[in-house]
Amino acid sequence: MMTKSKRQRQLFYLIPYSIWLILFVVAPLILLLFQSLTTPNGHFTLKNYATYFGSGTYLRMTFNSVWYSFLITAITLVISYPMAYLLNQLKQKQFWLLLIILPTWINLLLKTYAFIGLLSKSGTVNNFIGLFGIVPQQLLFSDWSFLLVAAYIEIPFMILPIFNSLAEINPRLEQASRDLGANKWQTLKRIILPLSMPGVKAGIQAVFIPSLSLFMITRLIGGNRVITLGTAIEEHFLVTQNWQLGSTIGVILIVAMVITMILTRDRIRRTGRKRGTLHE
Amino acid sequence: MANVPTAIIEFKNVGLSYDDNEVLKNIDLELEAGKFYTLLGPSGSGKTTILNLISGQLTATHGDILFEGDIINNVPVEKRNMNTVFQDYGLFPNMNVFDNVAFGPSIKGMSKSQIKTKVAEMLDLVKLSEYADRDINELSGGQRQRVAIARALANDPEVLLLDEPLSALDYKLRKDMQYELREIQQRLGITFVFVTHDQEEALAMSDWIFVMNDGVIQQNGSPEDIYDEPINHFVADFIGESNILEGIMKSDYLVHFTGKDFENVDAGMRPNERVEVVIRPEDLDLTTVENGKLIVTIDDQSFRGDYYEITAIDDDGNEWQVQATNKSLVGERVGLTFDPEDIHIMRFNESEDDFDARLESYEDDSNDDEK
């Protein structure tokens, strides 16, 4: 009887979140799927998917989304891993980590506008290079300014999981590796890097997946030179009012995210520290 | 002095401080090749610090560390021909048993077939041949310990450093590993430097013990020397059980304590010097009041399997630990007897060199007397 009432109490705690989940996650997903499979009159059709896959424009957008997400992820990873590694060796590491996380507390739109201020023709950067007699450059609305701002925004989300997985590694392992004759570089390659892979994968998930559907930065910073699936969805829902095709692209985006999650999931947990209790 | 064998490891006035905290004070020591050395002491005594200075994990604040006669102060860890068995083993969880043991040889650039032979040999040495493909997580504590030993030995080190490697094991396993480690050391003939806080372990395994306290080597010697002739209160108390009392050395071979004079075998002190007297509990025998050199009342008794541990109090209120084979009655008045050679005298603040010199002087005397 005790267990039954405990169970009931647990169910009770679940109610608020369940309602939230149904209203704002499950229902929209069903609606999205439903709309992608119907005509504006509500008849079942696969036409939307046929349009999507039959159009070079949409496939190019898809490719663009994946390609730019890949670039953003690669750039953040190259910057974040050494940074996380360094952070982990500092004495006041929690403090420095806080400084890196701090920007994530500021609204995304605000940060994007700040970059417009920095990069515009009369912005800070152009003013600065003007001091050396260089004429103002077109910095905004370029591929690289888009990549710069996207990477800037995503870096904390890459550093944090990598930092955590590095912090979990027993410092003794590095000592043991050096003791056995490995230099710093060999130790990094053979011990630290493999053991921090769960964090790297988590970081890739945290950066790659949201990057697939970026649309605000593409417009404000990229000047719509880079058209991604996120931009396309926004266009269909807000401008062309073609909700059916917008939903279709939405579904495809979700499928792409799921595939990414599957590819980067931790297949075999060999890191041991999490399973270490097995024979202790 | 011409034929002094070169030490494999030598410390010359080595010290280590963190800020104002002196962890290690002016250590001098010499280790010969092929012996089993133990650094014994309580936690914070500096024993692990010495180990880390040998391995290169720490750098000395002052002094020189020599390996086969060459100063190695600035040689990095990975370039020293010695390996460590860590207290928590430090096995790589992303590798199986084979890859852990193969780590050193593969870093050295040995060929695949050489590595295979080496790992097989090492796993055979620690009796884990069947476990090569196991994950580290699938091993028991004792098995991990063996992998750690195999991994450290796979590099063919000239010195193996062991940092309290047995402390995480249960009693029975620890005993077995003591014998096994000793056997491995003798089979391979390399130098072992073993760190422990367990005096029993130190006495059982070592050729030579360094007793550490407060960052200073209190005494070094063979297990027998250290047990039989502790230099000071700390060593006497730390190694085994001891009855320690204050006394007065009236003259050579005559000591006064508990209000009586006793014949003993120590000499070389000033007349009427204040000293400490040590008698081991196993050297005390219970007898009748008439035959006793000391009269005591039994205060407490506990059964220890192979003996009874008795606490008795003499008429001056001194407490005596006695190990007896027969049971006694609590409250009973009995006599205690001991032989002159069971009394060991310690001077206050005597340095190890003075202690050794004094021992030599009167041991020579007594030898001369016999001739």
Image (cartoon, coloured by chain):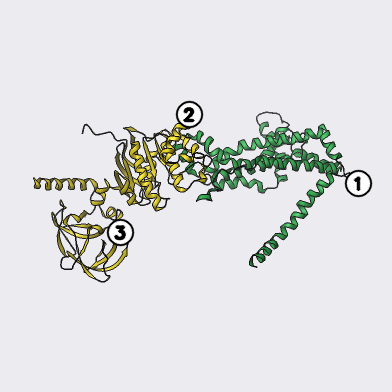
Chain colours: A green, B yellow
Q: Are marks 3 and 2 on the same chain?
A: yes
At a point 68% along the width and 28% down the height, the residue shown is A134
Q: Quadrant location of the C terminus of chain B?
A: top left
Q: CA distance from mark 3 to mark 2?
A: 52 Å
Helix, strand or loop status at disc 2? helix
Q: Residues within 10 Å of mark 2 (few under 14, many from 20)?
A: few
Helix, strand or loop status at disc 3? loop
Query: Counting residues from the N terminus, which is met first, the one under dot 3 or under dot 2?
Result: 2
Please state if B73 lies on the left or on the right of B255 as rendered: right
The dot on residue A41 is 1
Identity of the residue furthest to the front in this view: B130
Residue type pointed to by label 2:
Ser
Residue type pointed to by label 3:
Asp
Helix, strand or loop status at disc 1? loop
Q: Are marks 3 and 2 in contact (CB under 8 Å)?
A: no
Q: Residues within 10 Å of mark 3 (few under 14, many from 20)?
A: few
- What is the x, y in percent for residue A204? 65, 40
Please state if B267 lies on the left or on the right of B40 as rendered: left
Please state if A98 lies on the left or on the right of B296 as rendered: right
At a point 29% along the width and 60% down the height, the residue shown is B307
- What is the x, y in percent for residue A106? 68, 48
Q: Chain of mark 3?
A: B
Q: Quadrant location of the N terminus of chain B?
A: top left
Q: Are marks 3 and 1 in contact (CB under 8 Å)?
A: no
Q: Chain of mark 2?
A: B
The dot on residue B113 is 2
Q: Tally the numbered discs.
A: 3
Q: Chain of mark 1?
A: A
Q: CA distance from mark 2 to mark 1?
A: 72 Å
Q: Which residue is mark 3?
A: B306
Q: Which label sits in the foreground, 3 or 1?
A: 3
